Image (cartoon, rainbow, N blue to C red):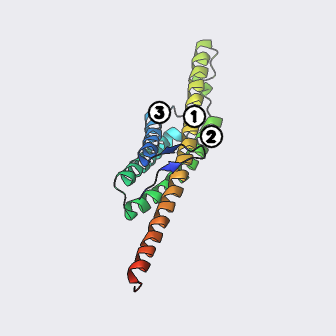
Amino acid sequence: MFPRLSFSSGWTCGPAVVGAVQIMVGLFNVGLGPGRTSTHPGDLSSLGAAYWLGAVFIVTGVLSVLAGRFPSPCLTGFTVFMNIVGAIFAITAIVLYAIDLSAASLLWMCNNSSDDNCRKVALFAQRLLTYMDVTLIGLAVIQLCVSVLSAVQGIKALIGGMEEEEEEEACSTTPV
């Protein structure tokens, strides 16, 4: 029921590959979450955003794998719904990580001290935080693309399945 995704170059991939990408994006979100330093109240660390974003991405990936392995209209429909939710959460992740990226200053940790070592460590940590945010934004963009593509292909599969059922009904009810 859940078709292979095909790209303009002719390269195709199955739901297992799409699901694996989504699961990996979710694991990166969850894995990099504990390494984040809270820079101000209401930032990603205090919201726990990496955890709930990662959980949604992992669930979406697992459902994509299951829909490819055990195709049924119900599971495919729920997978399409979860891929739409995953796309919305990917957009949310891009926005949240971009906001965090713009406000990622750790120089406050030095408490206006003139200690150069403190400033060097704070700038190094700030650079790491920036790289993490950029990486997670890139992964969220990948999640967005994969989720949208997977949802579109799932909708096409559901519509194609409904058209096949209508054709079978028309053939079986027509007197010969």
Q: Position of residue 23 (x, y in %)?
A: 43, 42
User: Quick check: 156 above or below 8?
Assistant: below
Q: Position of residue 19 (x, y in %)?
A: 43, 45
Q: Residue at x 53, y 48 (%)?
A: 6
Q: Residues within 10 Å of mark 3 (few under 14, many from 20)?
A: some
Q: Position of residue 168 (x, y in %)?
A: 41, 74
Type of residue at label 1? Asp
Type of residue at label 2? Ala
Q: Position of residue 55 (x, y in %)?
A: 42, 46
Residue hosting label 2: 98
User: Quick check: 112 above or below 49?
Assistant: above
Type of residue at label 3? Leu
Element type at marker 1? helix
Q: Residue at x 37, y 61 (%)?
A: 72
Q: Residue at x 54, y 43 (%)?
A: 11
Residue hosting label 1: 133
| Farthest residue, direction bottom | 175
User: Quick check: 71 above or below 139?
Assistant: below
Of the numbered discs 2 and 1, the one sitting upstream in the chain is 2
Contact between labelled residues 1 and 2, with CB atoms less than 8 Å apart: yes
